[in-house]
């Protein structure tokens, strides 16, 4: 059984302080290559050496082994084209297992409003920040809060059969978070658009820096920093959620105690556990009185990532 702080550690598992990290983690960080875009003063991605060596890079992308940097073309359109050429070639020659999950969806590369885009399936290979929406749908009555919890399909390539947030999905390039939420709610939970538009409330963000393991499917040890836009939706007690696509196996309506038990038993997808802890904090279910690690948990749910989402002012 894991504590709440251990659940945070499981998802936000990139070292916070390098000098205090185990030698294995320090070595991992020191060996990373930085992905560089001309429009930004900071790295926009972190790439493992074994990925770098196996990737069939476009000749438009420059690699400096001495500085451990990977430079995209200065022009945003050329950068997008170079990344597309690279990942399409890698897919063609079946270089990475991760690319078997090709989505034909584009993710922004240098922040949510980025002009540089990349195929979603390749984002973790580049270690870029990705963005998503996660919503907790619940009912409230004399017996307290009841939360709608879906189980992921057993056929999913990532985290099969694990528990999830009521609605969750990635934000594609050019898409606004709320529009992404409406789309995902309809696709995954059969929630009518008017109910989501009227009732869903943005409650902030949850951010973390995850290093992928075998549960995620595909190559392991990849950098996956993420920012999730978090929403709540209180539903009428007679509302029943049902899967409307093949990504969700079933829905449960569980009490807070049942959700907490499943969390402690590690049955939830790691980032979904963080979103639920955030929900518990905001609804005063998790408090400084009943959680000894309260302050650490709250701070860790909003990690400052070692990237920038804003381009240089002179660009």
Image (cartoon, helix red, strand yellow):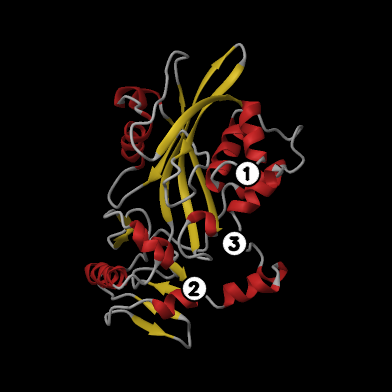
Q: Using the rendered view, name the quadrant where residue 88 is placed.
A: bottom left
Disc number at residue 207?
none
Q: Identify the residue shown where x is 27% and y is 73%.
A: 89
Separation of marks 3 and 2 at Cα, in angstroms: 13 Å
Circle 1 Cα neighbour tier, 10 Å, few/some/many (<14 / 14–19 / ≥20): some
Pair 3/2: label in front: 2
Within 10 Å of disc 2 (Cα), the crowding (few <14, some 14-19, many 20+) is: some
Which one is nearer the viewer's eye here, 9 or 292?
Answer: 9
**x then y, percent, for residue 235:** 45, 20
Task: Say if mark 3 contacts mark 1, CB within 8 Å.
Answer: no
Q: Quadrant of residue 250?
A: top left
Residue 48: numbered disc: 2
Residue 245 placement, left or right of 16? left
Please say whether residue 109 is visible from this viewpoint. Answer: no
Q: Position of residue 86 (x, y in %)?
A: 29, 73
Seen from the viewer's position, the closer of residues 282 and 274 is 274
Residue drawn 35% across the image and 39% down it: 246
Q: Which numbered circle lies on residue 266?
A: 1
Pointer 3 local density, CA inside 10 Å: few below 14, some 14–19, many at least 20: many
| 31 displayed left or right of 286 | left
- Which of label 3 and label 1 is nearer to you? 1
Q: Which is more N-terminal, label 1 or label 3?
A: 3
Percent across and percent down for residue 311 are: 36, 63
14 vs 217, left or right, is: right
* Residue tagged 3: 14
Residue at coordinates 37% horizontally, 66% vertically from top-left? Answer: 312
Q: Secondary structure at mark 1?
A: loop
Q: Is 65 situated above or below 276?
A: below
Q: Is residue 61 left or right of residue 78?
A: right
Q: Nearer the viewer, mark 2 or mark 1?
A: 1
Q: Quadrant of the N terminus?
A: top right
């Amino acid at each position: 059984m894991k504590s709440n702080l251990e659940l945070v550690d499981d998802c936000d598992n990139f070292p916070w302080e390098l000098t205090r990290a185990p030698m294995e983690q320090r070595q991992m960080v020191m060996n990373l290559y930085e992905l560089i875009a001309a429009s930004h003063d900071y790295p926009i991605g972190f790439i493992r050496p074994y990925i770098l060596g196996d990737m069939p890079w476009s000749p438009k992308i420059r690699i400096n082994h001495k500085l451990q940097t990977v430079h995209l073309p200065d022009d945003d359109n050329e950068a997008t084209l170079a990344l597309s050429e690279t990942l399409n070639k890698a897919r063609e020659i079946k270089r990475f297992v991760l690319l078997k999950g090709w989505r034909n969806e584009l993710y922004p590369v240098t922040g949510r409003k980025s002009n540089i885009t990349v195929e979603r399936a390749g984002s973790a290979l580049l270690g870029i920040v990705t963005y998503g929406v996660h919503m907790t749908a619940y009912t409230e009555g004399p017996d307290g809060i009841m939360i709608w919890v879906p189980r992921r399909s057993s056929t999913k390539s990532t985290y099969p059969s694990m528990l999830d947030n009521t609605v969750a999905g990635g934000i594609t390039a050019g898409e606004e978070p709320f529009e992404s939420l409406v789309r995902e709610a309809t696709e995954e939970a059969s929630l009518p658009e008017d109910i989501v538009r009227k009732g869903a409330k943005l409650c902030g963000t949850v951010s973390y820096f995850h290093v992928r393991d075998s549960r995620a499917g595909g190559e392991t040890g990849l950098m996956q920093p993420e920012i999730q836009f978090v929403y709540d939706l209180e539903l009428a007690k007679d509302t029943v959620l049902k899967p409307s696509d093949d990504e969700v196996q079933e829905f449960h309506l569980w009490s807070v105690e049942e959700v907490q038990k499943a969390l402690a038993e590690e049955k939830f997808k790691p980032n979904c556990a963080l979103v639920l802890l955030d929900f518990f904090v905001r609804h005063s279910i998790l408090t400084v009185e009943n959680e000894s690690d309260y302050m650490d948990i709250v701070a860790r749910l909003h990690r400052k990532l070692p990237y920038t989402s804003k381009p240089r002012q002179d660009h």
